Amino acid sequence: MDTTNAPQIIEHLNKSLNFTPFVTRWIPGTAKFVLCGQPPKANGIIEILQLNKTELKTLSSIEQPKGIKCGQFLDNLFAFGDFDGKLKVIDLETKKTTFEVKAHDQIINSIDTCFNIGAPEIVTGSRDGCVRVWDPRQAAPVVSLEPIEKDVIPDAWSVVFGNSYNDERVIACGYDNGDIKLFDLKQNQLIWDTNVKNGICGIEFDRKDIQMNKLVATTLESKINVFDLRTFNNGYASLTHEGQKSTIWGVKHLPQNRDLFATQGGDGALNIYKYSYPSQRQIQDTEGKPKGVIGKLELLNKQDVCQQPISSLDWNTDKLGLACLCGLDQTCKVVIVTKLNLF
């Protein structure tokens, strides 16, 4: 790792919490972000914080019956999943619930939203092994991916939308047994699956609103898996990188540069990576068919920012290098990562 021009990770603001945070998200177009989690009484809490010059100021809080495990913005509304398997969509300003459904039999581990083109949709993944897609205008799921074998049910740990351009839309699902599945919502069919032999804690496309380009999956035992999705030939070209020496809880691509991403370490470390494409992304195999070529992954810098695992991280879409994060040490922080414009 060359540190000469490496991006620097600077803690800007921090705040101690009286609950365990599991998710943090910037409120679009503002200097505010939401924190969601579970207080000691096992109920749920949503706090709205604002950046001031010298502190993080709590503006308001919304209590919920059950702890909140995951959340994501659906345009100007906030969708979240709780420990009881319930999916809710609320207006943070009025605090009114606009959509509510018992989505799963067990905890909702992961959630993502898509609303840029076509109908607004929410995807949820649960401990019950199901991945479901919801239209918040109706109570029944649009798509429900159920486990085939009922004896050993894989835990759906991570779900995300991708390939969302024109009228296309795909979901990627990561499971505790190492399975990764791509499901095409337009064709209503599974288009690819693989197994990386380790639980998938985080999964993300480099951009969700373009044709599938790259997919990154992080695992329980410190691996980062990168897949080049532009060329299919009995699978996709991929690489596996040894990341932190701990569980990598999640991955977040930089909104302003899809080849840079951060990972959330179980050791409390924030790592910044750069993906470099090969000189030729596609070659011919022995039968003359196109075959993908994977690039390289480089660690740009790393910094211990929490004393326990980083449970969530979100980049600000308006300010390059500005991020909010939270950890299981019951802290939330705003960090600034410098020099990202150089990569």
Image (cartoon, rainbow, N blue to C red):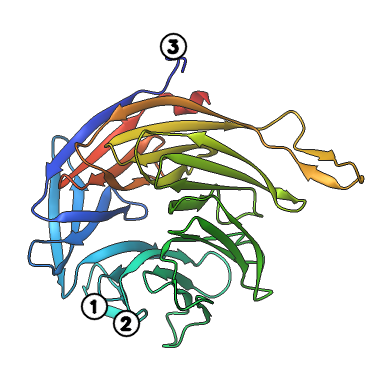
User: In percent of the image, x 92 and y 46: which residue is there?
Assistant: 287
Q: Residue at x 39, y 47 (%)?
A: 220
Give the labeled residue for mark 3. Answer: 4
Contact between marks 1 and 2 (CB within 8 A): the answer is: no
Instruction: Give the residue pinned by disc 2.
Output: 100
Q: Spatial distance from mark 1 to mark 3, Cα to Cα? A: 50 Å
Relative depth, front residue between 214 and 148? 148
Q: Position of residue 227 (x, y in %)?
A: 61, 45
Element marked by disc 3: loop
Identify whether 281 is placed above or below 99: above
Q: Can you see residue 34? A: no
153 displayed left or right of 142: left
Q: Secondary structure at mark 1?
A: loop
Q: Is residue 225 above or below residue 78?
A: above
Q: Amino acid at mark 2?
A: Glu
> Horizontal and vertical percent for residue 331?
16, 44
At label 1, which amino acid type do we have? Lys
Circle nearer the N terminus (1, 3):
3
Query: What is the CA distance from the residue labelled 2 to the residue labelled 3?
Result: 51 Å
Q: Quadrant of the rendered structure where residue 76 is?
A: bottom left
| Numbered circle sitting on residue 96 | 1
Label 1 crowding class (10 Å Cα cut-off): few <14, some 14-19, many 20+?
few
Residue 218, given in percent of the width and then of the height, sits at 45, 46
Q: Residue at x 77, y 32 (%)?
A: 280
* Front-most of residues 296 and 54: 296
Q: Amino acid at mark 3?
A: Thr
293 to the left or right of 14: right
The residue lying toward the viewer, choosing from 193 and 335, is 193
| Residue furthest top in the image | 4
Report the Cα–Cα distance between label 1 and label 2: 11 Å
In the picture, the disc for residue 112 is none
